[in-house]
Image: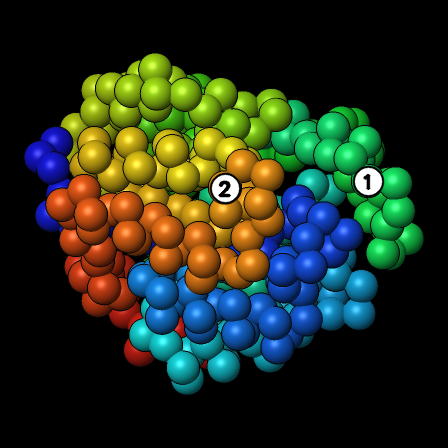
Amino acid sequence: MSRQQKTIITCAITGAIHTPTMSDALPYTYDDIAREAIEASQAGASILHLHARNPKDGSPSVDPDDFSPFLSRIKQATDAVVNISTGGSLTLSIQDRIKPAATFSAEMCSMNMGSMNFSFHPLAKRYADWKYDWEKDYVSNSDGNIFRNTFRDIEEAAKSLAPHDIKFEHECYDVGHLYNLKFCMDIGLFKTPVFIQFVMGILGGIGADIDNLVFMKKTADKLFGDSYRWSILAAGAAQIPMATTASQMGGNVRVGLEDSLFIKRGELAVSNAQQVGKIRRIVEELGSQVASPDEAREILDLKGGDRVAF
């Protein structure tokens, strides 16, 4: 695959892992999510990956009513591509998790390409006091949850969302997920070019190091040839170093408080925009250009912002 001319920056604004106790910068009210998304777009993010939260206590939500207040504001203030999560919960069904993407007919949505032991329970040991009652049990009990995305789940999501012409961000947490995606493509579930997010550094998935990134890319090249575009999401301290490496390999990058609360080792980020600004500066200083939202739409063959339902 030839080196891409423009680097797409995705910003994952709030996610479903981190809790309000872990960082005061983590947005969870409608106003905060809207503001953080708009500022991230202004800083250079062409794609905004969005989860929702209960605005009263910051707990993860897949209720479309918790998306609507900030989606309309983001749409009015930016031209960014909106990518709605179909994750958002380790316990809810695929029918519940795809409801926001279907309700708002987004240009993009995420899709985990397999079931996995997605855990972040070690974080519970770092905090003695919690802002809200739900937080400690939610984090500490994640070691007992399986994030379910079976082949049946993936097929149901693909077929249910097909009428909306939504492009999936295929989140691949390990090499086997690439083979799952190839199988799904072989049976006609997804249109090319597929957009693959290599997710690295999550407990339960592949580790965040350069050898693993090279192996993931080689495997994707073998399976998909020129029929895919790719990006990297590296958790925690690996976020910026791995994104920098990926950008020099012709890949796209994802940053944001969903994936890391830090701007550098030991220092909490003050906003999503701060992380976007940092990776944009690195990418540009290393000689690449950052894609605009319309350039991202062209690279990924998206339907366009005029065909969403918000």
Is 125 displayed left or right of 92 in the figure? right
Quarter of the figure that contains the N terminus: top left
- The amino acid type, in three-letter code, at marker 2 is Lys
Q: Residue at x 28, y 24 (%)?
A: 217
Q: Secondary structure at mark 2?
A: strand
For marks 1 and 2 on the same chain, the one whose residue lies earlier in the sequence: 1
Q: Residue at x 44, y 53 (%)?
A: 275
Is 15 displayed left or right of 186 in the figure? right
Report which quarter residue 109 is drawn in. bottom left
Indicate the position of residue 144 as horizontal and vertical percent values. 78, 27
Does residue 93 appear in the picture of this structure?
Answer: no
The residue labelled by disc 1 is: 127
Does residue 22 appear in the picture of this structure?
Answer: yes
Q: Nearer the viewer, residue 299 or 194?
A: 299
Q: Nearer the viewer, residue 141 or 166?
A: 141
User: Farthest front residue?
Assistant: 266
Is 202 displayed left or right of 75 in the figure? right
The residue labelled by disc 2 is: 264
Determine whether 119 is above or below 102 in the image. Answer: above
Indicate the position of residue 192 as horizontal and vertical percent values. 23, 44
Q: Residue at x 21, y 24 (%)?
A: 221
Q: Residue at x 56, y 59 (%)?
A: 270
Determine whether 239 is above or below 15 in the image. Answer: above
Indicate the position of residue 302 as horizontal and vertical percent values. 26, 60
Q: How is the image coloured?
A: rainbow
